[in-house]
Amino acid sequence: MKCWKPVLLATALALSGTAPAAAAPSGAPLPAVPACAWEPLGYQTSNVAYPDTNARYWLLRHTVRKGLAIRLDGRFPDARYASVASYDAHRGSFTAPDGTPSALTDHRLLADRGSGNPYREPARPGGKFTVTVTDTPAGRPNALPLAPAGTPEGAEGTVVYRIYLPHGKFRLPKVTFVQDGHRVRVGTCAGALSPGAPAVGAPSGTASSGTASSGTVSSAGEGTPARPVFSRSGGAGLYPNPDNAYLSAGFDAPPAGQVLVVRGKAPTATAGDRARPWPAGSAQVRYWSMCDNLWWGPGEVVANPLPGGGVDPGCRADLDTRLSPAGTYTYAVGTEEQRAAVERVPGVTFLPLSSVTPTARHLLILRNMVAAPGFAEAIQRVPAGSDAARTAEVMGAYHPKAAYCGLGVLAASGPEACLGT
């Protein structure tokens, strides 16, 4: 990220226009602060670390110093989900020696006095909260550990702010670095809230019209790759969200005239894109999605530019996914040229291959976010590193199955003919 570099107090003051709240003791170390706060990360900017296209992410980089505290003054957004998390120098989450986790989910945040938290109780969004990232988090409300025990001074750390499915406008937290009497406000990075290209996940007339004329291809034709299988993955080193648990399956691009069909039972999720108290009624998870990504490189999610403008993102959230009366989802992963034909099949949701490298190897990722305690089949209940067999044993009907299938077979006979169910 180009906008980060340590600078001393004088530079920070020039950026923020804020004076220290109190004089520092003579000889006290000056805090090293970033040039700006909240670098945007996501598919519309850098597109690394397998981002979900229904989320927005911002990074605050810092240099680990003894006694450093970072204060975040925020407002609860109107969104399906929000969180603040700290990461070590290897971009991994961690737990402090006292057991303090390095993430605060929206419903775990305490509102400032006089404000309400809409994720804990019925309240209007916009209420205030204060989070402190510190090397002494034990017993402090709304505190996150600065770094794992034993981290040397000078190591890099990161704080990540996440919002999923925002509704309307929102604000990023104000950032203040505090150390040895110095208080330094850091301004928000330019373009941090730029909307980027619009996503177009629903059926669109700008996509090329596909046909079912490839029906001569069988449901498992000659040269068809082996079926992909889903197993539990962790996302280590890629700023994994501790509130998410992931299944992944690598797959080769479908042969000409075929699509990859994926089916499983969908968990019930919180509805809409508004802030609501959690737990929420019969919801088993806060959110879930299926995303198609490129296998190679820095972890890109598919994001296909459309001829008429906008982008077809490689993720389909729960609210974008068609379900059967029995509560199962069916995805057909194919090219943009196959989209129209796929969307004519009842109960099937289209998921795009990369239009830039459609024949490259891809990676499907299924997310479950914040599983309810009673949801025994959640991905969170699968031991990390489990193979496909163990994953399927824990998840039962919620474990997705996949098979390559001729587009004509799918159109004429439905996904049952493809999956043998």
Image (cartoon, grey):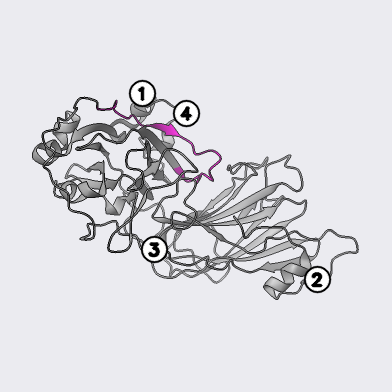
Residue 98 horizontal/vertical position (percent): 67, 42
Residue 294 horizontal/vertical position (percent): 40, 41
Instruction: Please report contact status of discs 1 and 3: CB closer than 8 Å, yes or no.
Output: no
> Which quarter of the figure has residue 306?
bottom left
Residue 370 horizontal/vertical position (percent): 43, 46
Q: Which mark is residue 197?
A: 3
Label 3 and label 4: CA atoms lie apart by 36 Å
Label 1 and label 2: CA atoms lie apart by 60 Å
Q: Magenta: predominant secondary structure element? A: loop
Instruction: Answer few, some or many: residues within 10 Å of disc 2's Cα (few below 14, many 20 plus, some between 14 and 19).
Output: few
Specify which label sits upstream in the sequence, 3 or 4.
3
Would you name the residue on which mark 1 appears? Answer: 389
Would you name the residue on which mark 4 appears? Answer: 385
Label 2 and label 3: CA atoms lie apart by 44 Å
Mark 3 or 4, which is nearer the eye? 3
Work out which quarter of the rendered image holds the C terminus and state it.
top left
Instruction: Please report contact status of discs 2 and 4: CB closer than 8 Å, yes or no.
Output: no
Instruction: Please report contact status of discs 1 and 4: CB closer than 8 Å, yes or no.
Output: no
Would you name the residue on which mark 2 appears? Answer: 22
Specify the segment rendered in magenta.
Answer: 224-244
Q: Amino acid at mark 1?
A: Ala
